[in-house]
Image (cartoon, helix red, strand yellow):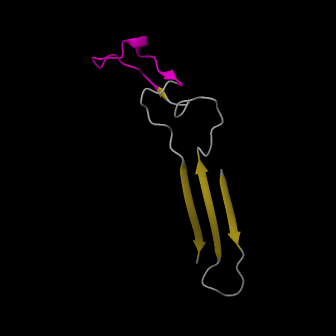
Amino acid sequence: MTLGYNVPLSGDGALKSLRLSVTGQNLFLITDYSGLDPEVSVTPGNSNGSTDLLNGIPIAGIDYTAFPRPRTFTIGLNATF
């Protein structure tokens, strides 16, 4: 989601235009999944480090100590002089 606002400027100031914006990614997730994040996909391995279990096929929704996708916020300022 991105929200932006163009600041109205008047007169002969130093700025010709000014825009403020905020962007958010992965803001919310609606699910009944009890783990950290159902979107993680990892390839499980056995105790010797190989991925013989399930022939190395990634499994969606099973988070074998995988990190969830991060929630990211970005603030922007665009000025023209």
Horizontal and vertical percent for residue 27?
Answer: 61, 46
Question: Going by the image, does 44 lie left or right of 39?
Answer: left
Dividing the picture into quadrants, the one containing residue 52 is top left
User: Which sits in the foreground, 12 or 56?
Assistant: 56
Horizontal and vertical percent for residue 79?
Answer: 59, 72
In this view, which residue lies farthest toward the bottom?
12
Per the picture, the main secondary structure of the magenta-coloured stretch is loop
Q: Residue at x 54, y 25 (%)?
A: 61
Q: In the image, is residue 19 part of the stretch drawn in magenta?
A: no
Q: Residue at x 56, y 61 (%)?
A: 75
Dividing the picture into quadrants, the one containing residue 14 is bottom right
- Against 80, residue 67 (above or below) is above
Dividing the picture into quadrants, the one containing residue 73 is bottom right
Q: Which residues are magenta?
A: 42-61
Horizontal and vertical percent for residue 55?
Answer: 41, 12
Q: In the image, is residue 53 part of the stretch drawn in magenta?
A: yes
In this view, which residue lies farthest toward the front?
34
Q: Residue at x 60, y 74 (%)?
A: 80
- Against 24, residue 46 (above or below) is above
